[in-house]
Amino acid sequence: MRASGILYPVSSLPTRYGIGGFSKEAFEFVDFLEKAGQSFWQVLPFGPTGYGDSPYQSFSTFAGNPYFISLDQLVEEGLLTEEECKEVYWGSNPEYVDYGALYEGRFRVLKKAYRRFKERGSEQKEFLAFCKKEKDWLEDYCMFMALKEENGGKAWNEWDLPYRNRERSALAVAEEVIGETVDFFRFQQYEFMKQWKKVHEYAASKGIRIIGDIPIYVAFDSADTWAHPEMFEFDEDNVPLKVAGCPPDAFSATGQLWGNPIYNWAYLKKHCYHWWVRRIERCLEFYDVIRIDHFRGFDEYYAVPYGDETAEFGEWEKGPGMDLFRTVREKLGDVHIIAEDLGYITPSVRELLAESGFPGMKVLQFAFDESESSLYLPYHHITNCVVYTGTHDNMTTRGWIESLSDHDRDFVRRYINSIYTDYGQFTWDFIREAFRSVADLCIVPIQDFLVKGNEARINCPAVGSDNWQWRVTPHFLTDELADSIYAMTKLYGRLYQEPAEEEPAEETAEETAEETAAETKEATTPEEQETKDELR
């Protein structure tokens, strides 16, 4: 079925306290999606962000970002007052997240809410049930965060040896000494999940499904690596042997050194990929569809010796391939997955994608270059794919158009048959080309519908600062904009409709006669049937 949706990070919602979250603005955006005829809301990873503020470098792949907890909701529940929220400095520009101010103010306010929550005790039964249900990851994460706070934010490999190596006696002492802090982190996750569940259920009631994002790798400084070092290519002292990266190419002579730990796939396979199955299962508590980042890494991944300053001397190594996804299917059934198959794709990756049956991605901004023959051009699209104008890693479409060479911009204009020199109209014609694609699903970043330039770019890869900050200003998503999106969605057949139930085929006269004879025979006693047979 053809459908469409909007890519809009939760952090970019125009809520009052420094960053987007699960307040009324999230529900209002769901209403906007419904009015615009959209079927999907795509978000970025939900994990708690660390250094650099990237959702792709999270302190946990299982936990939720406490920045998204709605303070307005906590006020309604009597856990905070408006005055307590307003007295905190959240930043001076509503269009950008001030992560420094957020870090200083958000946890201070949440601690006040936590103390009142514990004093009141009215939700303790639900809280304890949540902690029990999510225990397999929650306890490790909360202890990790509490110890990190106790160690002044240092990475876990810089902690004292007993804590670094998770000695039971040391952790038992920590539970006694900083148990209140551990419980505070449990409270954050309880509130996060309780609030997101309300948003998710509201979206479902409006026919909106959530597309989430799961990074292939985890951060080194995370509860995942601290709690399960055996799952990674570490030595006996839990120092990485290899880290992830990307080899040298036309864009970088020294490659890209991502620095994420490499999985010990042999160990994971031996244990039936349990951690990966649980990770995806956890994502299904957040999302309806999962986009897996860097899908190529499941076929082959680039491993760089730990300590290298560039990615020049890495090597390609074999990933788990379909063995992992077959196991996921056996354990969890058919999970709706989108494969991020961008970049240089080898024949073996194409084979893996085909065997998995997952839809890949087609990014229109990648289609228009000097060769005029890119595989991302719409005439190469297939139905089982997802077409994007751009992603969170790209320039906005308007910013991209402005940056093109005269040749490439002319090529775009000729291909999409745009007569406009105005960048606003040009951008909408480009969006129209995505909607026209044969791809089953079309996703457009919210910045493109708002015709924003690169001041609204979400992320510039390989640039360590000023990313993940942009926000929509209040009242920018108007009824007029929703009507325009709806009209385009209807025109190109992307208004989602529930598949109609198949009506039984009409019977032929011969089939009807046979069924009638059979029914008559069943209704006749054996003696009567024997007499009739003799008369024949």
Image (cartoon, rainbow, N blue to C red):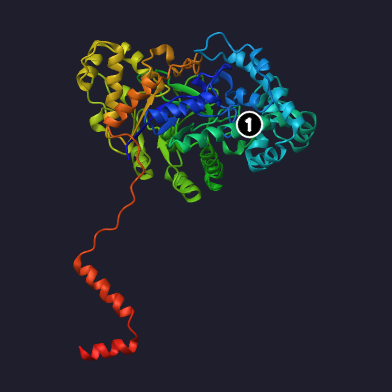
Residue 153 appears anywhere in the view: no
Q: Position of residue 30 (x, y in %)?
A: 46, 29
Residue at the (24%, 73%) spot, across then down: 514
Q: Position of residue 303 (x, y in %)?
A: 48, 30
Q: Residues within 10 Å of mark 1 (few under 14, many from 20)?
A: many
- Decide which of 354, 487 is in the foreground and name it: 487
Q: Amino acid at mark 1?
A: Glu
- Decide which of 269, 90 is in the foreground and name it: 90
Residue at the (67%, 40%) spot, across then down: 126
Q: Quadrant of residue 148?
A: top right
Residue placed furthest toward the top = 92
The relative height of residue 354 versus residue 88 in the rendered view (above or below) is below
The image quadrant where one finds the C terminus is: bottom left
Residue 144 appears anywhere in the view: yes
The residue that disc 1 covers is 191
Q: Quadrant of residue 409?
A: top left
The relative height of residue 63 versus residue 530 in the rendered view (above or below) is above
The relative height of residue 459 versus residue 60 in the rendered view (above or below) is above
Q: Position of residue 526 (x, y in %)?
A: 34, 87
